[in-house]
Each structure stands twice: as C-alpha cells, then as structure tokens.
Amino acid sequence: MNPLVLLFWYLGLTGPAGLVVATTRGETLIPIRVEHGHPAVPAPFLARVLPLTSEIRAEWAQVSFAGQPFRFLLDAPVFLHGNRVVTLAGGAYVDRDTLFLPLQWLSGYIPQVLSEGYRYDPLAGRFEETSVSPVVTKIPVVVPRPVAAAPRKVPTAASRLAPAGVLRSPHLVVVDAGHGGEDPGNPGLHFPGNLREKDINLAIAKALRTELRRRGIDVIMTRTRDSLITLSDRGKVCRDECDLFVSIHVNSLPRRPGFESVSGFETYFRAESRSAEAQRVENMENEAMRYETSVDAGGGGALDFIKKDLQTNEHLRESALLADLIQTKAGRVHPGGSHGVSQAGFVVLNTARRPAVLIETGFSTNRTDGRFLSAPAGQQRLASAIADGIVAYFQRYENKVATESEP
Ligand SMILES: [Zn+2]
C-alpha cells in the first residue's frame, strides 16, 4: 500500500481518539476505525509495535500474536484460536489491501489469554505490553463484551414483537443419519447388543426430527431406515427449500493406551482439516465412500471436491456460527463435555448448498458416552439441545434479515 494513501486515510478517517499501544520500546497511537459498525485497528500498524504477523488466505486472515495462532474468518464476527471458535461483536475485514482486526479481540480477548503479558485500560484507551513474557492462560469460555463504544443497532419492530424462542418464518432442515446398510460406521464398542454407529445415528436423527418439528421446523431425513446412501447424494437432498444440513455421527478411537477414556461432543463445519485429530475423523467419515459403487460423475471424484475448499463455500461463515451454537447448547448436556468446534473436509458436507455441519455426538469407545448415546433418554436430551442450537441460529438469521431490510 502506498504510504501516502495510508497517511491520508489515517488523517481523514480517524478522529482524535485512537488506541495507545505502550511497550518497553515506547508509545504509539494506533488509529481506530469504526466504518464497519465496530471498532477495528489496522494490522500493519500493530505489526510495527507488537509481536504480530498476518497473512490473508482465501476467506481467512491468519494472524500470529505472541506466538499464538488466530484465524479470522473475514467479514464474519468469528475467529478461531487454535481449534476454538470465538464469536465477536464484529469481525475482521480487508479494505484496500489493509487488514483490520476487531479492537474487541485485541483489547478484550488478548489480555485474557495472555494475561501476564498484556493489559488493557478501557478508560485511557491504552493497551500495554508488560515487561513479563506472556503466559498463555486457560482460554476463557465467555467472550468479553466489546470495550469501546460500538454503535448499537436499535431493535427492529419485528424483533421487538417476536417473543423469545419463536421463529417468525418457516424453516427446513435436512437431518442426515450417517452410514447405513452395508456401511455400519464404527463397531460401537460400548453400545449394547449388536448396535453399531449407523443404528445410533438413525435413532438420534429421528429424535432430532421430533425435537425440531416440536419447535415448528420442517425436517427431511436422508434416510429413515437401515439403507446406504452415497455421501454426495446425502448433501443433494439439501437444495432450494432447505436451510441447513446436519449430519449425525458417533466418533470412535483406534485401540491404543487410554483410548477408552476419551469422551465428549464435537461439531465440525466443512473446511480444510486443521488438526491431526480433525484429519483422522475426516478420513474415518469419508471412508464410507468405500461402500459406494458409483463414481462421482462430476469429474475428479469426491476427494478432489474437498480440495476446492474455502473459496467455493459461500456458507462457511454461517456453518461456523451454526456449529458454534449447536456446540454451546449440546456441550452442556453431554456427560463427556464439549470438545469444541473443528473444521474438516467432509465429503458429505460438500454437496449441501446450504450451511452444513457434521456432529460427532460422542465416542462409542467410551463407556459413559456409549451408554448415554444408546439410551432413548440420552438421545432425546441431546437431540433437544441440538434443536435449541439450530433455533438459536435461525433466530440470529431472522434478526439479521429484519435489520438489513430496514429502510
Ligand atoms: Zn460416522
């Protein structure tokens, strides 16, 4: 970027208020911009005075701060810290080659996770780097409220009228019970009798159908009995009328020391796999293609499809938000707790033309999870929590549409 342009932009668009960044090397005033409705700071300015690097890749800004990895989904109020999805009041964006990072992330989140190394004084608008080297503290579950005064949106007439928990418009969700027929899924070590993953997936999917219908949401199932459907055909069920695609699975681990002790609930949205564990789950679920006799007619096969990746998926941000809401609700009722949100390149999520998530409802290799997932009461509890997460997503969506359609 031309430094002169940068200077004009700096002088023209920022008021007297800025962010003071104080380090042992001195103090610097960083301009704050509120053009996108929330305060944001230009990454190149921060990079001069703080241990920050950034790089734009497709829809993501990859940011390293004091050695910590952050990935910001551009134009979406969400970022990933490692594998954790954190939501914000407003997101990162790029304007004329310059990356802007939400002030809320720098002033609220960083001092929480790097508490020894950084402090923020909201009254003075001052971000301080202490002389102590940063120590990574436990990642907080609750995201701090925005500290700077972001312009607030006045609730619309529609959103004021809508009582909590009630959706205003009709919605259709495609619920996909993973595996089926010749493809049993994982063997279900701690499921009773001869139950295997495909059976549990179907039972939870049916419970989810009931819970969604109870909340006024229409449901189409990819299968309602023990039959095999190709991964690409499952996603195709979610087309014009469909709002969301939700695939239900049960995780399992290969035999290795301690493998039975791992438990918990996890939601994936489709993107390149980020961790070795996400890669393992991706391979496991894509393995179902082994049972498919037809070759994907699209050319290049289903695996090539994965590689098309981020650029082609316009629903990535919505999928990430949906995954986060489901994870938050269901993580609370699951005996194995929450594993957080992850990304992986699931073929089944590729062909859905809508926001899509894949849920690993627990581990069949864990005794407690196995019991919870195979009991009708457990299935119903989990399905109810997942349905609550989906309702929360639709409420956000409806409020957003209502706000945007205001004159
Ligand atoms: Zn599975």
Image (tube, rainbow, N blue to C red):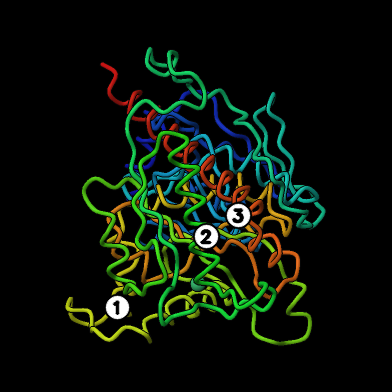
Element under label 1? helix
Residues tagged 3 and 1 counted as in contact (Cβ below 8 A): no
Residue where numbered disc 2 is placed: 203
Amino acid under disc 2: Ala
Give the vertical position of 83 relative to 91 (above or below).
below
* Front residue (pair 75, 303): 303
Bin the neighbour count of mark 3 within 10 Å (Cα to Cα): few under 14, some 14-19, many 20 and up.
many
Please state which of residues 356 and 84 is positioned toward the viewer in this rendering. Answer: 356
Queried on whether the Cβ of the residue with tag 2 lies below 8 angstroms from ligand 1, the answer reads: no
Given the image, on which type of amino acid does mark 1 rest? Ala
Instruction: Indicate the quadrant where residue 397 lies.
Output: top left
Q: Residue sitting at 65 percent across and 76 percent down? A: 193
- What kind of residue is marked 3? Gln
Q: Verify CB contact (< 8 Å) between mark 3 and mark 2.
A: yes
Report which residue position mark 1 lands on: 302
Looking at the rendered structure, which numbered label has been put on residue 379?
3
Local crowd at mark 2 within 10 Å, few (<14), some, or many (≥20)?
many
x and y, in percent, of residue 241 in the image: 24, 45
Q: Position of residue 210 (x, y in %)?
A: 47, 45
Distance between mark 3 and mark 2 Cα atoms: 7 Å
